[in-house]
Amino acid sequence: MGVTRTWLPCTRVQTGIIIEKTVLNAISVRIFAAAVTFQFVGNISGEAYAQEKTEDVLRVELVSQGVISTDRNETFSAENPSDGSLWFSVYDNSFSAQTIMVARPVKSGWATPTVAPFSGEWGDQAPRFSPDGTELFFTSNRPREEGGSRGDMNIWRVVREGDSWIEPEQPDSPLNSEAKDIHSSVTREAVWVASNRERGYRRSDIYRIDHDGTTTHFSAPINDEQSQPDPYVSADETWMILVITDHPDGHGGDDLYLSRFDGESWSVPTNLGPEINTDEYEYGQTVSGDGEYLYFTSRPGDSADVYRVPLSDLLGGGR
């Protein structure tokens, strides 16, 4: 059967309005600009595409509606760079009682998600891959010893052996501490983690732990009296997208901010704007295995869902 293209010309002339069009329950596209005329191209291999007539467009997509993004709360997505599978966490009523899910890639997008082999009993969230896909770090309240009771949130690690993942282990200090250690980001040289350990402002601050255990706590402009509960740092550590909670210049709740490293210092984080951030919560940012997309979680309505945007829209072609 041939490809059918349906052209739906639309015009938006007021900032702050979101135009959303769902095609075949595949991907919903949100287009934002000051005054934008664009066309939707529908029914192309089961996905929706938008052809813009302006440069000032962020192409934000709701990922795989009905499969990945559903009426439940889907959070903290991460694409496995080894096989393209999409890992994410999901919850119904309690944010601390999440389960990590895996969706295998298929021609139309992703197959129906299944529970990750090591998840389902405790509160597991925020899967984060190493750049080569051989390690997976995640946040969990599972007990350190078998038969123990639920603990506080810590960073856990699983290693891939062939097509299987070994049993999770909890890394020792300095990756974990007596404090609450959450939401990691793995680069070629280090693991970055958000923690409220004593060295910082006692809210969630960002720390860098390199392979020999050297720990760096960042002062302003990365850490300050606000909470920074979730970092994503590029594999080469030249830029990061971090969450800042209730920033006085933010849109409300958790917002995503961009900071760049010039070889000596990190720039003042800049808000990614209303095209990404709402007055609710945006977090769980990671980059796809091919470096093309930024995935993130947003809750503009009744439930949290997974969105993505071309990374070049945010970085101007850089990765």
Image (cartoon, grey):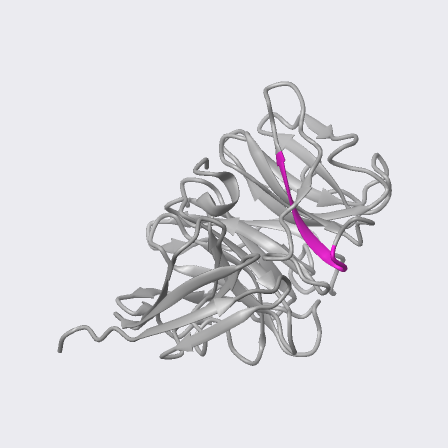
Residue sitting nearer the eye, 15 or 83: 15
Q: State the image quarter where residue 104 is shown.
A: bottom left
Residue interval drawn in magenta:
251-259
Q: Main secondary structure of the magenta part?
A: strand
Q: Is residue 151 above or below residue 265?
A: below
Residue shown at 46%/65% (left/top)?
Answer: 117
Task: Determine whether, in the image, residue 70 is placed left or right of residue 181.
Answer: left
Taking the magenta stretch, the answer to whether it contains residue 121 is no
Q: In the current view of this chain or complex, which residue is farthest to the left?
A: 1
228 vs 105: above or below = above
Q: Nearer the viewer, residue 167 or 267?
A: 267
Image location of residue 40, percent across then percent down: 37, 69
**Quarter of the picture holding the N terminus:** bottom left
Could one spot residue 95 in this view of the protein? yes
From the top left corner, tell me how far across and down residue 300 is, in percent: 64, 70
Q: Does residue 2 appear left or right of residue 192 in this picture?
A: left
Choose top left, top right, bottom left or bottom right for residue 175.
top right
Q: Percent position (x, y) of residue 47?
A: 33, 69
Query: Could you tell me which residue is drawn at 79 percent across and 30 percent down?
Result: 219
Horizontal side of residue 306 vs 173, given as left or right: left
How many marks the image carries: the answer is: 0
Residue 142 in view: no
